[in-house]
Amino acid sequence: MKTSTEQSALQDKDFTRYLLWFVYACIIYSIIGFSWGAIMGGVPAFRHFVDYSAHGRLITLAHGHINLLGWVEMAIFAALYYVVPVVSRRSIYSVRLVKIHFWMHNFGLIGMVVFFFTAGLVGGLSTGEDAEKLVSHLLAFVGIFGMLVLSANIIWGYNLYKTTTGWQDRK
């Protein structure tokens, strides 16, 4: 059986590992998002498809979500996971919730982006009523994966709230 000091050291190591994974995810999503934007802007045929096809805007939404929920949010998560425990002079409330947040957010984001992109591609290449039906079904999956991202963000907020609760009582 591990002592409380050993358990604390393991939690600190896990917390640091996941904090850095948020940073690495931020870097990866920024490279993907910036490259995607450069391709959308720099390849005339792709730009025309995105701008003028029936559902090309969905590809733009996929790009926007990879940047906002990937690059920007991952940076904010990493920063606040680091800063809040320092400012409140308390350990993070739950390393387990940090792990759940990380995996749930990434799984949800990747699902959203894949289904946004697929809906935009399928909707842009197809015509007719069947295309509209297929696009709406694909967008339902965007909503499902979006709920995972929302749930992950609520877990994050709860974890930080619980970390800071009672900070003034600490000497």
Image (cartoon, rainbow, N blue to C red):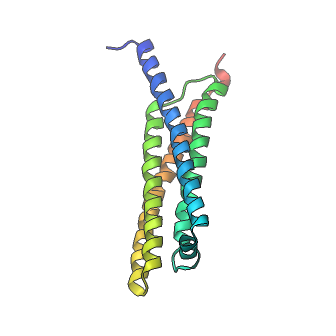
Q: Position of residue 27 (x, y in %)?
A: 55, 43
Rendered view: 35 above or below 97: below
Residue at 42% x, 57% y is 111
Which of these two is toward me, 94 or 71?
Answer: 71
x and y percentages locating residue 156 in the rendered image: 53, 41
Instruction: Choose between 63 and 39: the one closer to the eye.
Output: 39
Q: State the image coordinates of residue 99 (x, y, percent, origin top left).
A: 44, 37
Vertical side of 106 occupied by 98: above or below: above
Instruction: Point out residue 87 in the picture as x, y percentages from the top left corner.
Output: 67, 27
**Is residue 165 visible in this depiction of the protein?**
no
Say above or below: 129 vs 148.
below
Task: Report the residue that reaches farthest toward the left.
Answer: 1
Is residue 29 visible in the rendered image? The answer is yes
Rendered residue at 31%/14% (across/down): 1
Which quarter of the figure is the C terminus placed in?
A: top right
Q: Is residue 133 left or right of residue 15?
A: left
Q: Quadrant of residue 3?
A: top left
At x 45%, y 12%, the residue is 5
The residue most toward the bottom is: 128
Depth check, front residue: 159 or 139: 139
